[in-house]
Amino acid sequence: MKALALKLGGDPDQWEVLGLIHDSDWEETKDHPDQHTLLTIDRIDDPKLIHALQSHNTSLTHLADLEGQMEWALETCDELTGFIVAVALITPDKKLASVTVDSILRKFASKSFAAAVHREQIKMCDEKLGIPLEKFIEIVLSSMQKISSDLGL
């Protein structure tokens, strides 16, 4: 999220915080997905972060529409980061360093690989952020590779 903020002119610190906290209540709400984000919203006081969190799970909570670039960056990036992890986990060393944009694109085309990932949501990066899919993958992958030790990958 921070790298996307830098590319799109957003507040890097705020976007990074959103990326870190957006699923912080998942363990508590995973059996009630319509409650996901509500606990996190109750724990913060930044109006922009609150709106972004309200829009994060809007298909179930119906709290807010996706409006700004920060919300759309989270919407598209959230699915992509999980997909990239899935690609890393099938490499022999299970490391992000072994993952390339091309390897992600090849797996992206295979609907049976990580079938639960909403590819159409990721592809919204072009329309909503003005970043073509290949470039979007490059930005997100590079950012994840920089913190691979933190991610354990």
Image: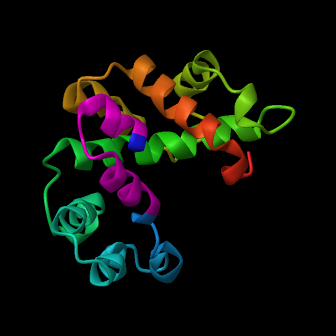
Residue 147: x and y in percent read 63, 44
Q: Look at the magenta stretch and give its main secondary structure.
A: helix
Classify residue 37 by image quadrant: bottom left
Residue in view at x 42 percent, y 66 percent: 21
> How has the structure been colored for display?
rainbow
Question: Does the magenta run of residues contain 15?
Answer: yes
- Camera-side residue of 54 and 18: 18
Q: Is residue 92 magenta?
A: no
**Residue at 35% across, 52% down:** 13
Residue in front for this viewpoint, 122 or 49: 49
Q: Is residue 121 above or below residue 24?
A: above
Q: Where is residue 61 drawn, in percent x and y?
A: 23, 71
* Observer able to see residue 115: no
Q: Quadrant of the N terminus?
A: top left
Residue bounds of the magenta highlight = 3-20
Residue name at image x 40 percent, y 52 percent: 16
Locate residue 58 relative to residue 13 in the image: left or right. left
In the image, residue 124 sits, relative to residue 22, either above or below, namely above
Asked if residue 95 is positioned above or below residue 14 in the image, the reply reads above
Against 22, residue 127 (above or below) is above
The total number of labels drawn is: 0
Q: Residue furthest right?
A: 92
Residue 14 location in percent, x, y?
31, 55
Decide if residue 9 is on the left or right side of residue 151. Answer: left
The image quadrant where one finds the C terminus is: top right
Whether residue 106 is visible, yes or no, is yes
Judging depth in this view, the residue of 43 and 121 nearest the camera is: 43
- The residue positioned 52% from the left and 47% from the top of the image is 116
